[in-house]
Image: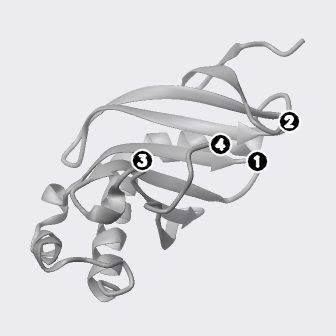
Amino acid sequence: MVDKSFMTSFGVLERSEAPEETSVWSIRIVVDNRFFDGEIPLYILTKAEMPSVNMLRLAEAILGNMESYLETGISFLKRTLTEQAIDFKISDREREYLAREIEEFPVDLPEVILYDDQEEWVLRFAEGLFSICDPYGININFSSDMPISVDNLEDSEEI
């Protein structure tokens, strides 16, 4: 039988079931920095019984540098939406948001999602003032510590 929780160097991970024989291990960390003040959930999705040592190391590295990852992610998002405004259907009204400083960039409720022993992971903002953020937010995909792409989730389906 698999435990429902276990202690890590960054806190207690709680296990829940997900579709397709996947386990979701999660923790919420409290942050207070120039980009976000509140709880940020971290989810580890795995088909294994427990997250691997590599997954736990990646989670620890991300959580230990959350302010830096928020800054990097928001900067990348701002640059991507500015450079690809047409592709992301940024309206004239929304273009005004692109001029904001990154500390005031209109995305909110960040969460971190790690997948089954992969170096790629997601910084998702569940809310934002851009129309593409409705209803599921917007993803910034990272490979290790570098952002690599932005996913528009407006046409996604609920799981």
33 to 137, vertically: above or below:
above
Task: Give the Cα separation between the discs numbered 4 and 2.
Answer: 16 Å
Bin the neighbour count of mark 4 within 10 Å (Cα to Cα): few under 14, some 14-19, many 20 and up: some
- Circle 1 sits on which residue? 116
**Amino acid type assigned to the residue bearing label 2 in the image:** Ala
11 to 74, vertically: above or below:
above
Q: Quadrant of residue 97?
A: bottom left
- Circle 2 sits on which residue? 48
Q: Residue at x 84, y 34 (%)?
A: 21
Residue furthest out toward the right: 1
143 to 70, vertically: above or below:
below
- Earlier along the polypeptide chain: callout 4 or callout 3? 4
Q: Secondary structure at mark 3?
A: loop
Percent x, y of residue 11: 54, 21
Q: Secondary structure at mark 1?
A: loop
Q: In terms of depth relative to the viewer, which is nearer, 95 or 55?
A: 95
Of tags 1 and 3, which is closer to the observer?
Answer: 1
Of tags 4 and 2, which is closer to the observer?
Answer: 2
Please state, as top left, top right, bottom left or bottom right, where the N terminus lies in the image: top right
- Earlier along the polypeptide chain: callout 1 or callout 3? 3
Task: Give the Cα separation between the discs numbered 1 and 3.
Answer: 21 Å
Task: Give the Cα separation between the discs numbered 4 and 3.
Answer: 12 Å
